[in-house]
Amino acid sequence: MSAVLFQHNYDAYVAASAMLKEKGRAAVIHPTGTGKSFIAFQLCADHPDATVCWLSPSEYIFRMQMVNWRAAVQNAGTEGDRPANICFYTYARLMLMQTDELELIQPDYIVLDEFHRCGAKMWGQGVQRLLAQYPDVPVLGLSATNIRYLDGQRDMADELFDGNIASEMTLGDAIVRGILNPPKYILSTYSCQKELERYRDRVKNAKSRAVRAEADQYLEALRRALEKADGLDEVFRKHIENKSGKYLIFCADYEHMQEMIAKVPDWFSKVDKEPHIYSVYSEDAQAEAEFARFKADESEHLKLLFCIDMLNEGIHVDDVSGVILLRPTVSPIIYKQQIGRALSAGKKQGENAVIFDVVMNIENLYSIGTVEEEMQVAVRYYRDRGESELIVNEHFHITDEVQDCMRLFRKLNETLGASWDLMYQAAERYFETHGNLETTKRYVTEDGLSLGQWLDTQRKVRAGKVKGVLTEAQIARLDKLGMRWKSKADWNWERYFTAAQAYYREHGNLLVNVWDGKYGDVNLGKWLAQLRTYRKSGIRNSYLTPERVKALEAVGMVWDVPDYLWEQNYHAAVRYHREHGNLDVPYYYTDPDGVKLGVWIANTRFARRTEGTGRAALTGDQIARLDELGMIWENKNNAVWEKSYMAACRYRKKYGNLNIPIAYVTEDGCHLGRWIRKQKETYHSGMGEERRKKLEALGVE
């Protein structure tokens, strides 16, 4: 057995290795926190001469997995660091790679980490192209779930691995076997207060008088129940037993995180008046250092790490005492990933993490209730097989402080359900007329129903951006009408990015004119210009995410167009200098690559002469690089005059006079005879004093 792998992972590794040899595909489906990435690292370590193409949702996840692997190797007292045979790519990078780039990989194994993410449209296309390129290469998949719950219940183990599952373990099974310790689960009423306000609005907007009357009764009962419930400060005081523990707090977005951090004094002062507060999110360049400080904090104070999505997948945190769920989500994948952060493999028996569910995630379709069911299935399974000794935990404790409130909320939902059917009928009528559901957000039907706002709300509820209940049956009914579930911003991103990819394949760049940038059915030039503004000003980070920035750069996105064009022209100047030995470029000269070098040289001279007038100035580095090529900064007339004057000086030194024939031309092409004649003609009219003195010193009569 490997000194690094736990027994459950070693068993999975043996099964996966055998399946890879026999079938060529093997999936390992283990819950978050059980160390399943080590299975793939063991594969790399056992085949040091093989090239392993490792794919992951983010580079950060992979780096953290490597840190954990190195620590496990060192603790086991064995040799080894990062396996040198890993060829790593993110799914975002893979989807942009061309065929010739894929041909360079030549893998012996392919690892699909978090393979349920391969069901995404763009990422999935990149994976399918790689698998088609190397149909005979063994593929190992790792994930906490094979089902894409909000994508038509797609089974990615079937789609990618032909159902070849080498090892499968539910979260409930892992708790029963003691691989993960059972949590102490706390339900609080924090979000109920906000839910009460939302339901008041729903009741007020209900079309039926009878519905409003019945719902008002439940609202009043809810208000009284909530008045009797403990506040969140008291909930934390009662249930945070480790006063110096580390807690992960999951938030919805950056604004929500800042709002929640501001509540720390109110919520946690009864536990610790001076808690240590940390925060990490993907757009923050200091996130990795902040995360490291949190992990290293061994003080006697309460440690709180606020995060958005960074810790959902693939990242292990030692010694976590619990998690606090402040982000509403209808995705069971994200839900189980978040609570799994507190249930890591290897915790000592009796070290039970506490999970504070303060946003009612417990009521999601796939929730902690499902985990309890998974545990009961596992218990029955081991008892039926005569393996009761494997059963370590049969239950975990749920402290339900909102039982009465939740009963009333369910009653309210049942009462207001008729309103959903009413709006759906309006959506059906719109679809029959227009053939789609692409309304504006403010669209109102003839009978006064806010259909546009309702459709937008359904999208947000399904995405977990707002609280609400949307059943699978309701989703299926909307799907029949061609419901677009992505937000308009995400939908537009895909349209424009697809156009950008096509433009890059056709032109080899993304230098699209902003005023004449129509490409296909989108104004690509204007869109790219907007993105450059977003990047430079730091706005719209929720739209221009780091993942999207990398995707754009992979297809030739230039963020600073002026600097890019300067470099392009400079390299043309270098090529001209190599060929001609100077930068005496005719004004209308265009090089073989289409660069209008003569115009650029003239404009560059003008920019140097007009520094300080508000025009874009040359940098010191740019000036120095042009000086190395012999750039003459005076205007061209001055440069020609000085060149001819020096030729006259050389002639006089050689022949002792300036009796130059009118047709005389120097070896380097200077028409010196005609130039001398012109100087004599203009000596008394139109010539500057400085030139006149230089000619007199030379002996021109």
Image: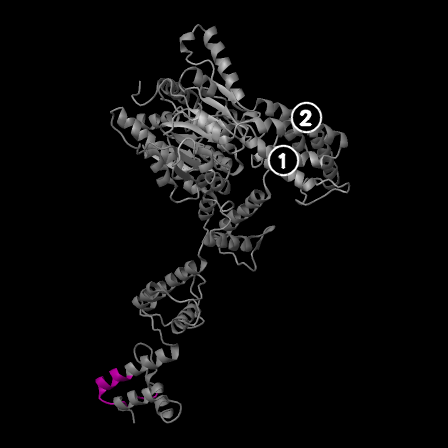
What amino acid type should be assigned to the residue bearing mark 1? Answer: Arg
What amino acid type should be assigned to the residue bearing mark 2? Answer: Glu
Q: Which is more toward the observer, 23 or 360?
A: 360
The residue under label 1 is 198
Residue 675 location, quadrant: bottom left
Magenta span has 655? Answer: yes
Residue 355 located left or right of residue 427: left
Magenta span has 272? Answer: no
Q: Secondary structure at mark 2?
A: helix
Which class describes the residues within 10 Å of circle 2: few (<14), some (14-19), or many (20+)? Answer: few
Q: Which is more toward the observer, 531 or 340?
A: 340
Q: Which is more toward the observer, 436 or 510?
A: 436
The reply to whether residue 471 is in sight is: no
The residue under label 2 is 414
Give the image location of residue 52, x and y in percent: 36, 32
Give the image location of residue 616, x and y in percent: 43, 66
| N-terminal-most mark, 2 or 1 | 1
Give the image location of residue 292, x and y in percent: 34, 37
- The colour scheme used here is one colour
Magenta segment boundaries in residue numbering: 648-662
Residue 285 against residue 577 in the figure, above or below: above
